[in-house]
């Protein structure tokens, strides 16, 4: 074969031979370019149909709890009444759901035949539409207030316990075990002796019990993160302990804590409903989901429509928050096949 001779010549670049590529000319993955952590979490969350369904359920019930009583012409503790032909006052007690011209209205006292009661009335004569959404508002307020305070207490307690370790951790964890060993009903019974029944008793009871799970999650995350390089670098540079705990480690553990919060909210709502159901929670004329269920349970055989609205609202709240919690857990720690 003939040999092929390669010759090289020196190349001298000239002006105009090269030009900078514009951003439009570059082949960039625009979906994930410069994507932050929380943006990725939102993308994974809204791809989860069940999580979005749960979020819609929670938002709809929350909006109805805020604005539902406002669209009604009756107050949550107002006893609807009218005057009959004989001049006597008649209450609208135990009227089933009715909308004049659409459904209901049969065998109803003639004074209330033209009134609208979407969920009917209770035995006293109060509008169940207003009371259901007002009760949902009370239950949500109790749940959110207690969970936010419990998150702050439990998160701080667990992070401090896990960070310092040693004797400090041993003492703090023994306190947690003692607090966790006391049954909730015992705590409520003791509180009922010294406190009047109502929203305050329910909030204090939840504050004394719900922070424990939060502290365990925070402590586990602290033990996992406190020996990482960025923490060791901060210690070497002379950063203070509380600055490291709340300024650097906390932002890196907030994901599991948020997930725990979303699962704790339905637990708090159910606990409030249970306490009100057994008679140590919200008292009349104020109402909550639990007190409405308790009131409807007393008439379940004769007036079953009274218990349906609060039970359905409670079930939807529990389902919605659990769907949102599952979606957040998957979005904060997505699997490889979900990427």
Image (cartoon, helix red, strand yellow):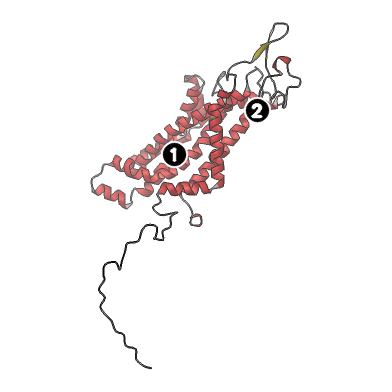
Q: Residues within 10 Å of mark 2 (few under 14, many from 20)?
A: many
In this picture, residue 230 sits left or right of residue 281: left
Give the residue displayed 41% in from the left and 58% down from the top.
28
Looking at the rendered structure, which numbered label has been put on residue 307?
A: 2
Work out whether residue 191 or residue 283 is closer to the camera in this orientation and state it.
283
Q: Residues within 10 Å of mark 1 (few under 14, many from 20)?
A: many
* Rendered location of residue 111, percent (x, y): 71, 14
| Outermost residue to the bottom | 1
| Outermost residue to the top | 87
Question: Do the residues bearing badges 2 and 1 touch, measured as CB atoms within 8 Å?
Answer: no
Q: Is residue 331 above or below residue 86?
A: below
In this picture, residue 302 sits left or right of residue 33: right
The answer to whether residue 277 is visible is no
In this picture, residue 255 sits left or right of residue 74: left
Mark 2 vs mark 1: in front: 2
Work out whether residue 70 or residue 255 is closer to the camera in this orientation and state it.
70
- Of helix, strand and loop, which one carries label 1? helix
Give the residue displayed 49% in from the left and 45% down from the top.
328
Residue position for label 1: 214
Q: Specify the quadrant of the image occupied by residue 98.
A: top right
* Rendered location of residue 240, percent (x, y): 26, 41
């Amino acid at each position: 074969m003939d040999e092929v001779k390669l010759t090289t010549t020196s190349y001298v670049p000239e002006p105009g031979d090269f030009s900078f590529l514009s951003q439009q000319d570059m082949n960039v993955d625009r979906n994930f370019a410069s994507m932050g952590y929380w943006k990725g979490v939102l993308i994974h969350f809204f791809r989860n149909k069940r999580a979005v369904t749960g979020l819609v359920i929670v938002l709809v019930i929350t909006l109805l709890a805020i604005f539902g009583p406002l669209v009604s012409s009756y107050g949550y503790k107002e006893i609807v009444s009218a005057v009959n032909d004989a001049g006597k006052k008649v209450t609208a007690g135990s009227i089933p759901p009715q909308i004049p011209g659409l459904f209901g209205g049969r065998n109803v006292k003639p004074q209330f035949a033209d009134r609208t009661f979407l969920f009917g009335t209770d035995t006293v004569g109060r509008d169940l539409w207003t009371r259901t959404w007002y009760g949902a508002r009370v239950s949500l307020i109790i749940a959110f207030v207690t969970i936010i305070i419990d998150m702050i207490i439990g998160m701080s307690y667990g992070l401090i316990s896990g960070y310092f370790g040693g004797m400090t951790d041993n003492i703090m964890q023994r306190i947690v075990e003692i607090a966790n060993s006391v049954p909730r009903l015992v705590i409520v019974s003791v509180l009922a002796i010294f406190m009047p029944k109502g929203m305050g008793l329910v909030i204090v009871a939840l504050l004394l019990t719900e922070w424990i799970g939060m502290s365990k999650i925070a402590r586990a995350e602290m033990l996992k993160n406190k020996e990482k390089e960025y923490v060791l670098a901060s210690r070497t540079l002379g950063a203070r302990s509380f600055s490291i705990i709340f300024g650097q480690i906390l932002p890196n553990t907030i994901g599991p804590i948020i997930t725990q919060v979303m699962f704790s909210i339905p637990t708090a709502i159910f606990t409030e409903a249970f306490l009100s159901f057994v008679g140590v929670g919200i008292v009349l004329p104020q109402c909550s989901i639990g007190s409405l269920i308790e009131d409807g349970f007393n008439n379940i055989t004769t007036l079953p429509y009274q218990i349906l609205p609060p039970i359905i609202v409670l079930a939807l709240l529990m389902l919605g928050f659990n769907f949102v919690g599952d979606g957040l857990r998957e979005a904060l720690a997505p699997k490889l096949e979900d990427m």
